[in-house]
Image (cartoon, rainbow, N blue to C red):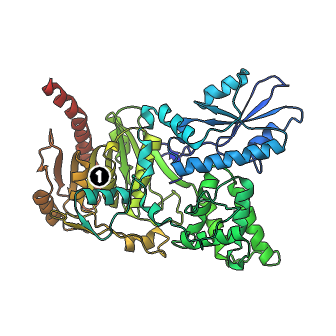
Amino acid sequence: MALLALRLGCLNPAPHRRWSRSRCRIVASNASAAAAVVWFKHDLRIDDHPGLVAAAAEPRRPVVPLYVFDHRILAGYSDKKLELLLFALKDLKVILKSQESDLLVGLGNSEDVILKLVNEVTMQDCLPTLEELKGFLKNSRTQEDNWVPLRSVSAKSILKKTFDQRKIKSTVTSNISNGGSIEDTIMVSATSGRRITDSMFASENSLEVRGGTGITLDALAAYLKYLEGTGKASWQELHDKVRLAETRDGASFYTLFGTAIQLGVISRRRVYHEAIQYEKDRNAGFLSPFGYSTPTVTAAVNAICSMEHSLQYTVCGHEGPAVLLVHGFGAFLEHFRDNIGNIADSGHQVWAITMVGFGKSEKPNVNYSELFWSELLRDFISDVVRQPVHLVGNSIGGYICAITAGLWPSLAKSLVLLNSAGSIVPNYPFIPLSESYDPGAVTVIESIFNFNLSIPLNFLFDSFGGRILVVQGMKDPLRKSDVFVTMLREHCRKVHIREVLFLFASLLMVNMSGHAPHDEVPDEVNSLLCEWMEETEVTPALEKSKAI
């Protein structure tokens, strides 16, 4: 999931911080005759490249192109994406050589490699093989990279694997092997069996366009002209892939071109320019005020305008255990306005986000689901917070927190549910899990009618295995709280009432509040949360001392 995060101050206007990888950078000495080192970090092209333009601003200044295989950047890449990266770099080297230049290659921390280059240490100019690159990344792994593999497997894949291991019946059988993503199982070839000489894809079963700028632009032209048909074999191959990748309106564009845009093989500006130019060519130079004339142009423009999902978040407190607050449906991070500062003042680093699809966060064309949002939390914790958190969620946010903790337990120190959505299913002998959601539900409001909250909370509690606090407002108009509390008592292991210390899970009832106790009685909830988190931090130390 490609994401940007916009950081706010503690609920006060402040400059935005983007959760994203930065783009190409230029390193040059102060001497007027010094060379400019252009670090191709994520812009693997010479077309429409702002770094090269700046480097070539002085006509007589030498320009030294450089790519660094930095494990910190590549640690989250799948084998497929590493292969596509090498295809793109190979094409970039060919283009640079045609311009009487070449691409220097370094392996290691980018800052160290650049300093060595500036100090005229000899660099290699040949690319590693895929196996050599995988070996380098394996040997370079650090403690901070341990969470990176979590992102390589989807939430649905983990659920299905767990169902198989625990012999829980479901509506869908698992075809996953080697920890692959469930989405990969449908990535079978839709071609007619022909061998394509100039294929735009890495393999017959691949759905991602491979290669450099030239190949990608040719593929984009074929995509935009899908409705016109073609007699060109490579274009026909791409059209076959489009039919396979269009799992919902507009989904095929990101499937085909997402990796190329992430690697910077082609810029989003160029995609937008090509799509609009094609639209004008079809309509005598005009753009209709009623939308685009082809679904491929619509898909391309919509995708590149929301490809990196902007995520609004705030953080208060510079040190202490991390806490992540997750709002409910239709809300945003300001719903915790009376909690963030108070919890931070008690010695915690408090994070709160506005989930994608709500408030000031991006609202992209995706299938919104509880699994989509749980993967969002996973990525935010591993990429931004970078340490385990106390997960605190209200309503549907609580359910999403429970999924995140249940599927990726290493990310959560404890789980706190504030009038959470979800249900308790005794023994959960059968868990229905739908394959997909309504393709027409492309907005958050529409998607609520397609939510599948069928994963039982007690299943997620058991999968998490850590400390769980349930805070239930008893006057909740959306749920029969007394029935829910009874089910918790009867069917959730290690759930106790009011007995918090040293217990793995506790239930606290707030009699005077409704669906959002943190907002209705914030002082009481803040006190409960701070006490709970303090005990959670102390418990491991006490258990360790007892063992001694």
Q: Residue at x 63, y 46 (%)?
A: 86
Whether residue 333 is visible? no
**Place of residue 139 in the rendered image (x, y in percent of width and height, measured from the top left):** 48, 32
Q: Is residue 296 left or right of residue 244?
A: right
| Residue 56: percent from left, percent from top | 83, 38
Whether residue 271 is situated above or below residue 24 in the rendered picture: below
Does residue 314 appear in the picture of this structure?
A: yes
Q: Which of the pair 391/474 is nearer the observer?
A: 391
Choose between 507 and 441: the one closer to the eye. 441
Who's the residue at 70% across and 78% down the image? 229
How far across and down, in percent of the image, does residue 527 sit? 24, 42
| 286 sits left or right of 127 in the view | right
Q: Assign the C terminus to one quadrant of the image.
A: top left
* Residue occupying image coordinates x 14% and y 42%: 503
535 lies above or below 208: above
Dot 1: few (<14), some (14–19), or many (≥20) neighbours within 10 Å?
many
- Would residue 542 be found to the left or right of residue 371 on screen? left
Q: Quadrant of residue 27?
A: top right
Residue 8 x %, y %: 51, 45
Q: Residue furthest right?
A: 60
Disc 1 target residue = 406
Q: Which element carries disc 1, helix, strand or loop?
A: helix
Kind of residue at disc 1: Gly
Identified at 58% across, 68% down, the residue is 252
Q: Total label count?
A: 1
Q: Nearer the viewer, residue 401 or 139?
A: 139
